[in-house]
Amino acid sequence: MTKGTPQAAGSEAGWRVVGKAAAVLADRPCAAAADGVELVLVQSLAGLRAYEARCPHQGTLLSEGDIVGGELVCRAHGWRFDLATGERKDAVPKACLRAHAVKTEGADVLVRLEREQPSSALLDKSRAKRTLADLPGPRGWPIFGNALQIDVQRVHRMLEDWARQYGRIYKVSVMGKPAIVISDAELAESLLRARPKLFRRSGAIEPVFAEMGTAGVFSAEGDAWRAQRRLAMQALSNRHLRTFFPTLRRVTERLRERWERAATSGEPVDIDDDLMRFTVDVTTSLVFSTDMDTLGSGDDVLQRQLSLVFPAFARRLLAAVPYWRFVRLPSDRALDRALAEIRTVQEQLVSETHARLASRAAGDDEPRDFIEAMLLARDEDGQPFGDDVVYGNMMTMLLAGEDTTAHSLAWVVHYLCDHPQVVDRMRAEVDAALGREQTPGDFEKSQRMPYLDAVASETMRLSPVAPFLGLESNEEMVIDDVLVPKGTWVDLMTRLPALDDANFGEAEQFRPERWLEERPQGCPHVPGASMPFGSGPRICPGRSLALLEMRVVLATLVRNFAFERVGATEDVREHFAFTMSPRGLRVRLSERQAS
């Protein structure tokens, strides 16, 4: 329901058909668009309503939210809006969604946009006072620019160090391709909110992902992105997560049993590896209805092969020359073998899903998981998604579900090893919430641990697995006061603003309490300066699942085990391979003693 731009025959001027009335259901919001403007349609007790598509908080698409108790609930941070009025009742001053006139004609829904749409300041060329040539930045080499200075494994650190030297906006170049680097939180959020119209992901991403067979919702753009994003959000919806919780608990019990064996043996644990096995099991169960049980296996093929993919992304996206298209190095041949083995697993899953769908009774076409949704869905032209899109999105879900959450949890463990007082407070909260249970027993209990959420937020502020985001401008525009040509790379340093004392008091310190209103008066706290999941319409679709997994795993860890790092704090280093992981983190577990 996203194309909807032609005017309906015989309708009044200004009205646009945006879809079919039958698609606007009472229990869920519906995405639509007219003349390039994103909309959300809802059914209220007062009738059909059409609102601006983005939450005024951080620009998240409201069509990805839920309808609960007569309110439209944003998926990102829980803002709630009355279906009939668009008003956010719990805000002071009250916030209200912009409404658009809407009506039905026969089976069609028509919307008339307000004509006083504000023009984007980004497109106001009169604001330009500088060009890219005027920006400071590190000196590069002829032809190569700064490409030869970049160390892939610590590229985030290099960009942050240059930002401290050259300021909140500076320039770099790679093989003659200009890029600007921004480390200002408000400016970064304004650019993220302008997606997908004014910005796309870096143009290098699409071909690299496509040639590796991983082209899915992460790398897609335009109408293709909207259709694939909608399916991903259905698979990761809160209502789906609630019904999935018993499976999540079962996988968590396996992790607990694995850690019990490690505690008995006294052998150090590669905590990041264990957590990646956990997240693979969760992801395959949730989106593929398949129990891989990598936690119970000694050497799982899927998890081992997936571990090669993200480093390959990082190498190829940051390479000065695409050498792999001409010469295959041993690492490239290893990647080819890994991708072939992963494809074999994917083909088996798709084959099993086709058989499952064929065995269902006529009319039973409600998808049970992500693969079923992909196979049953149709694209913007009414055609089934091609094999490349299906397999690409399967890989996207696997990769996104594995590394990001696992690394975030591993970083939490790293910080907890140095802050026993935080562990004590976590245990007190978990003990009160769980009673005699060893893991959270139901979805509701997992939501009653605000201090665990604060620990997760503080960890992701200091060590986000995505410390920067790469965009590319779709139009000539003005960023701050700089005229930026179409096609310019724009790197947003999402961690650096969160390490600024102006945004968070004593920003370098690990203090979860700052997220619970337990701050000294006058101590800065700007939550929007921390963006571990991004912002805007393309905010991470797996945010709710990631936070749920983190709560359940952390509750299980502190409830059942004592733990300590093997080695010194400084032995653990940040390693960038498309995501940032704690390299060298090993932990020794022991049974928690009764207090």
Image (tube, rainbow, N blue to C red):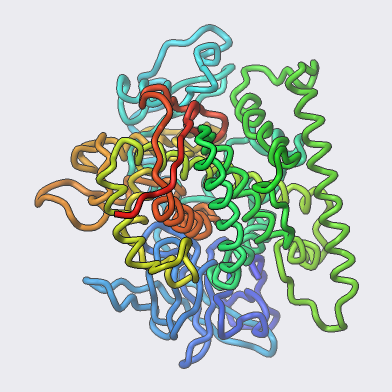
Q: Quadrant of residue 244?
A: bottom right
Counting the numbered discs, the total is 0
Q: Nearer the viewer, residue 577 or 375?
A: 577
Q: Residue at x 22, y 71 (%)?
A: 93
Residue at the far top: name it.
142
Q: Residue at x 55, y 15 (%)?
A: 147
Tell me residue 553's x, y (percent).
48, 53
Q: Residue at x 60, y 75 (%)?
A: 16
Q: Quadrant of residue 319?
A: top right
Q: Nearer the viewer, residue 139 or 28?
A: 28
Quadrant location, the C terminus: bottom left
Q: Residue at x 44, y 29 (%)?
A: 180
Residue at the far left: name it.
521
Q: Is residue 337 left or right of residue 542?
A: right
Residue 569 vs 464, above or below: the answer is: above
Q: Quadrant of residue 325?
A: top right
Residue 459 vs 536, above or below: the answer is: above
Quadrant location, the N terminus: bottom right
Q: Nearer the viewer, residue 487 or 431?
A: 431
Tell me residue 2's x, y (percent).
64, 66
Q: Is residue 353 left or right of residue 557?
A: right
Q: Is residue 77 visible in the rendered structure shown here?
A: yes
Residue 429 vs 303, above or below: the answer is: below
Tell me residue 226's x, y (percent).
63, 59
Tell me residue 124's x, y (percent).
40, 45
Q: Nearer the viewer, residue 18 or 463?
A: 463
Q: Is residue 186 visible in the rendered structure shown here?
A: no
